[in-house]
Amino acid sequence: MINLFRITYTYLSAGIYSGTLYFYNMRKLQGWYAHRFGPLLVLAVILCSLSFITRVILLIKSWSSFDLNPLYVAGAFLVGMFYDLVVWSFFAIPVALYCWLMKDSWYRKKWQRIPLFSLFFIITLILVVNACAEVVFWDEFNVRFNFIAVDYLIYTTEVLGNIWESYNIPLIVAAVIVMVILILFLVRKNLAASRQSSMRFGKRSAFFGMFMLLPVAAYFLENNRLKNFSNNNYINELGGNGIYEFGTAFWHNEIEYDKFYVTRNDTANFAILRNLLQAPNVSFTNDPLSIQREIKSDSPEHKWNLVLISVESLSGDYLKYFGNKENITPFLDSLIPHGLWFEQFYASGTRTVRGLEALSLAIPPTPGQSIVRRPDNDDMFTIGSVLKSKGYECNYVYGGNSFFDNMGKFFSNSSYTVLDKRDIPDSLVHHTTAWGVDDEAAFDFTLQQCDRSFTAGKLFFNHIMTVSNHRPYTYPDGRIDIPPTTQSIAGAVKYTDYAINKFLLDARQKPWFRNTLFVIVADHCSKSAGKTDLPVNRYHIPCLIYAPGLVKPGVEKRLVSQIDLAPTVLGLMNLNYTSRFFGYDIYQLAPGKERAFISTYQDMGYIRDGKLVILSPQRKARLYSPDFTTGVNRPLQGSDSLINEAIAWYQGASYLYKTGWYKRVK
């Protein structure tokens, strides 16, 4: 009965919203359409109506995930309408310019309908396409537009190719055009009504000046945090506006930590960090604002090769080991007893570039975009720079175009040789998508690089980034029991599992196999959004080190962060080096110091001792008790020391990156 009441109330509130809009449109505001700037009102009706319909669709699509508290749902629609009007103020600028600058005697002519309706056609087309894109994006990521959408706009070749392969584009384009024409047909009389009025240039100028105060005020005074009024992230996202969220992400590529987050004295922060990073084999420099330290092994260095496989979007819950019933990772599950398995391993972020940042730089995420995408990210201190100083040949192998996500520039300027689909011979390729070649081709090409280095008498480090677990989720036919025509995530995951198995079987035949560490790890989970901010279960990923005869199989049950992988692997190799890593060598770590980092582009999470600290803009620091199974975070009080630790890690990482002290040791 309560659920029925909530459902009824939800639709009633939505109906009141749309009904009120319609009432004012057709009755109370009828006279305003005849005003010289009446088209502004027409645009407001179109934009708010499309946004309302989009919200209803998103609400229905994620119904089970919403907290259907009537006040929250009503609040989401009201806050959403506010953001809709903010977006309207920006979209209305070209319309207002037209109404202001068009000569009065010309404006009243019939022919002026052509430029006016053409302008509205373009704007309405953008709004309708945006509404469709928001629904698709929500299906994929359970959030409004964010940094991912910005990246998709930049990397048009991969994204447009992906869309063409995944959807019936001719049908969609036809439907969108019909929708735009229908909308313009419905508002044609109201749009043309402004021709009835006359307004002198001086009065038009005053009206235009007053109108422009709205977008100016919106730009300087508003942000996207007003929508975050509930404890349910789906409700908060529902209250946003996708276009506004896109603009926010576009203009905030990097968020200055010191300006937006709670801070402490740098000296105090680094005192905490140096204490937490202290280990039996570590000696720090005398600089109190540094974590640079010498790593000394008490055993001879191992001259082992290293192959690191970072798997696209491989969530922990895809594995049978963690309860999956679909059997889509049969090989990886079978490999666990034969390798060093990390049971509580957590990704730093929700994007491939965050995973690559953590795996190569071993640094906590900094607010905004990943360092891989930032300016001034050349010659960074990476696992590649450490191994290159030891005489290794270091390659970054990517089956797609390394221009995507700035991978090529970042890795090529940070001690790696970048090899992408342009370097992979056609003879190795079985299948291509907009994202690149099949994983088998990338793995076979990597085998060739390993052979080449071995023949030259060189140790090698090859980091491979897979691409097949991407929409449209297609792959070579005949490999697995899920046909590629299904275009399912399950099929893509199982194909990558197959490709990794084939790669290791082929590697077993090589003379360098018994002297090589193979590391298999995900870059991030397939989905990261949840009901609460930073749901811990959406960051849980698999990680396995496989090296028969070199590393003893076992299960590591302690909490491990993605940034700990590089120093842990180097520790297993007994390498002596100068470190600037924030990551731990887990096997040199005193019990109780384990911790992990999780993040979005603006929320920074720190997990330790079963608690979660979240640092957010507006200098917020919140403490939670996270449920590692459901992802629900329950608020806690106190524990200033844990909050201070979180600040030390994140402020310290931002400080070292900004000051250039995370560059390669020379």
Image (cartoon, grey):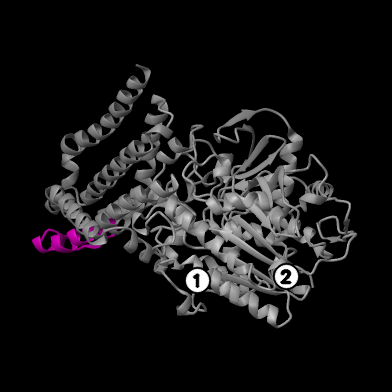
Task: Tell me if residue 73 can be seen.
Answer: yes
Residue occupying the point 61% across, 55% down: 521
Residue 114 x/y as whole percent: 14, 63
Q: Residue most toward the left?
A: 110
Which is more foreground, mark 1 or mark 2?
1
The magenta-colored residue range is 95-121
Residue picked out by circle 1: 441
Residue picked out by circle 2: 385
Q: CA distance from mark 1 to mark 2?
A: 27 Å
Would residue 288 appear left or right of 632 to someone viewing this image? Answer: right
Q: Residues within 10 Å of mark 1 (few under 14, many from 20)?
A: many
Residue occupying the point 64% across, 50% down: 336
Would residue 76 appear left or right of 519 to someone viewing this image? Answer: left
Residue occupying the point 64% across, 80% down: 452
- Locate the C terminus by quadrant: bottom right
Which residue type does callout 1 highlight?
Ala
Residue 10: within the magenta?
A: no
- Residue 200 occupies which quadrant of the picture? bottom left
Residue occupying the point 37% across, 55% down: 487
Which residue type does callout 2 highlight?
Ser
Along the line of sight, the residue nearer the viewer: 63 or 53: 63
Would residue 84 appear left or right of 149 to someone viewing this image? Answer: left
Would residue 457 appear left or right of 5 to someone viewing this image? Answer: right
Residue 104: within the magenta?
A: yes
Q: Earlier in the sequence, mark 1 or mark 2?
A: 2
The local secondary structure at tag 2 comes to helix
Q: Residues within 10 Å of mark 2 (few under 14, many from 20)?
A: many
- Locate the N terminus by quadrant: top left
Residue 307 x/y as whole percent: 65, 66
- Residue 629 occupies which quadrant of the picture? top right
| In the rendered image, the vertical position of residue 531 relative to residue 580, given as above or below | above
